[in-house]
């Protein structure tokens, strides 16, 4: 790998200057050089004419750019005679000979002046190198490696980085600026200065864990309860699951681990159900991944504290200027910097402690008509604010390598405006999207399924197929939330859970998270 540099023309210039110095020395010494029989080049100030030239040199391979400069002859004031391939050519008043129209191949030039003569050969190459690029794929947080081949020696350049291909063969460069979909342009320049350009689209591919994520939701209070924690650990040990989703901050705004985030302490949000590093070790020791769930904008504790302390712009409001509740207990302002920073501080603390993934929840606006609430300070759209915060979290997690997911409504694939969850835009900043495709949450006939709660496999398969289309090309996976609880009078147990898992597999997904609010899971992988 080399930095940008002088190239072949600068090197040729240095050779010409060195040659002129040598010619001057030879002339001063009055040396006669005899080449072959009967042919002589006289390079003596006193006994012949000194001939100096600037242009293609003996044995050099030149391209159109060098030819455009032509040949410049200096014969000590005498009028030189120049032939190219045996045919005399014109020399203008400045001693320049036009070479633009020379064809590819070898050519011989002879310059005569007085009793002196010089002859030499060079080659013209007008053909750019053949440049082929491999398909380019990049995972989130990683540089793009651009590789390909040339059919001759060349200098290959991309974004200021260069590498030399000594022979026809392969090269590899890293793209410092990556825009999936926009592509990168690579330039290959051969020794004659001919350049070829090739453009390759960059395809973003999903960053995947060592094993697929199959996990269960666990509230912080439940992890602190041995009768509830032990079955989850046994599921890990038996290989029935590969991950545990632990709540970091829940729907009530409770921070459920031993957080040191100053604002969480100041507003009384911390009610530790577990020591985060100890819990992570327990799960890691059993080969599991830790998914830290953060309920973001639904936050009654933060909303109440902000309102009571006069920070009312941190809270969504009714049109009459009151705190907006509507069944949420308190919904904070997703357009507010202090609200965002509070959540990000919790996220960064958990990432530094060693959680493998952050899963955002309530990363949306309220599911009510927008006429019912006011978002103080919002400059763009609801969707812009939500996507903007997801991008902020992506950047915050980059130094830790922590994966990032987001829980979304099952209907978000069809009606994203309902809760400001534009799936393709969000997915570009996520490792995975987690749609809540609980069968009990679908109505009759949705996705062509007559009775979703009694056809769990069908509704899961068809709804997930829609999400897969939404995330295509974004670099995000789909890791669905599945139902392991009873609702609407239809009892759910191992068979119903397994039906959902099989539905996801038919859609091409082998990852999932199970939800049971009581943390009492029926699934045991035996069905």
Image (spheres, rainbow, N blue to C red):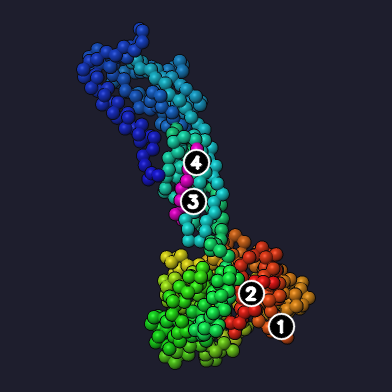
**In the displayed structure image, the side of residue 456 where residue 237 appears, left or right:** left
Question: What's the residue at 59%, 89% (across, down)?
Answer: 327
Q: Looking at the image, which is closer to me, 437 or 236? A: 236
Nearer to the camera, 413 or 506: 506
Q: Which-is-in-front pick, marks 1 and 3? A: 1
Q: Is residue 332 visible from the viewing direction of this image?
A: no
Could you tell me residue 384's position as x and y percent? Answer: 54, 72
Q: Residues within 10 Å of mark 4 (few under 14, many from 20)?
A: some
Q: Which residue in the structure is indicated by mark 1? A: 491
**Pointer 3: what residue?**
145
- The secondary structure that most of the magenta stretch takes on is strand
Q: Position of residue 518 (x, y in %)?
A: 59, 84
Q: Earlier in the sequence, mark 2 or mark 4?
A: 4
* Figure quadrant of the N terminus: top left
Residue bearing the label numbered 4: 170
Q: Nearer the viewer, mark 1 or mark 2?
A: 2
């Amino acid at each position: 790998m080399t930095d940008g540099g002088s190239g072949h023309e600068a090197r040729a210039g240095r050779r010409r200057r060195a040659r002129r110095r040598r010619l001057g020395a030879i002339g001063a010494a009055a040396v006669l050089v005899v080449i072959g029989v009967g042919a002589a080049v006289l390079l003596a100030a006193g006994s012949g004419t000194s001939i100096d030239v600037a242009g293609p040199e003996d044995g050099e391979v030149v391209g159109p750019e060098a030819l455009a400069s032509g040949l410049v002859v200096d014969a000590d004031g005498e009028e030189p005679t120049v032939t190219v391939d045996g045919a005399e050519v014109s020399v203008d008043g400045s001693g320049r000979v036009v070479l633009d129209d020379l064809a590819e191949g070898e050519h011989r030039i002879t310059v005569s002046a007085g009793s002196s003569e010089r002859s030499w050969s060079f080659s013209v190459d007008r053909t750019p190198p053949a440049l082929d690029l491999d398909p380019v794929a990049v995972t989130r947080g990683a540089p793009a490696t651009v590789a390909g081949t040339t059919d001759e020696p060349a200098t290959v350049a991309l974004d200021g980085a260069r590498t030399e291909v000594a022979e026809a063969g392969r090269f590899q460069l890293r793209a410092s600026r990556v825009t999936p979909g926009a592509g990168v342009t690579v330039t290959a320049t051969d020794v004659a200065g001919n350049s070829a350009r090739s453009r390759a689209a960059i395809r973003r591919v999903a960053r995947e864990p060592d094993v697929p994520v199959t996990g269960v939701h666990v509230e912080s209070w439940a992890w602190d309860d041995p009768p509830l924690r032990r079955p989850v650990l046994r599921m890990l040990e038996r290989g029935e699951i590969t991950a545990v989703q632990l709540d970091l901050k829940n729907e009530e705004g409770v921070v459920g681990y031993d957080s040191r985030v100053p604002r969480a302490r100041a507003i009384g949000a911390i009610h530790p159900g577990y020591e985060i590093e100890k819990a992570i070790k327990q799960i890691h020791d059993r080969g599991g991944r830790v998914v830290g769930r953060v309920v973001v904008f639904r936050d009654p504790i933060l909303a109440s504290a902000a309102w009571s302390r006069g920070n009312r712009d941190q809270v969504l409001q009714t049109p009459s200027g009151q705190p907006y509740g509507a069944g949420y207990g308190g919904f904070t302002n997703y357009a507010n910097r202090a609200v965002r920073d509070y959540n990000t501080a919790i996220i960064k603390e958990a990432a530094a402690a060693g959680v493998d993934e952050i899963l955002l929840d309530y990363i949306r606006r309220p599911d009510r008509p927008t006429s019912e609430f006011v978002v103080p300070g919002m400059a763009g759209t609801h969707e812009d604010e939500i996507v903007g915060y997801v991008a902020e979290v992506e950047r915050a997690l980059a130094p830790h390598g922590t994966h990032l997911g987001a829980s979304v409504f099952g209907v978000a694939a069809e009606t994203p405006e309902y809760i400001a969850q534009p799936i393709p835009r969000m997915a570009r900043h996520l490792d995975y999207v987690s749609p809540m495709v609980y069968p009990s949450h679908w109505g009759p006939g949705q996705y062509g399924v007559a009775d979703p709660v009694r056809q769990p496999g069908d509704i899961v398969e068809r709804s997930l197929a829609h999400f897969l289309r939404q995330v295509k090309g974004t670099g995000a996976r789909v890791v669905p939330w599945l139902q392991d609880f009873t609702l609407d009078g239809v009892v759910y147990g191992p068979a119903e859970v397994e039906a959902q898992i099989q539905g996801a597999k038919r859609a091409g997904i082998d990852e999932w998270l199970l939800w049971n609010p009581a943390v009492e899971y029926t699934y045991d992988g035996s069905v």
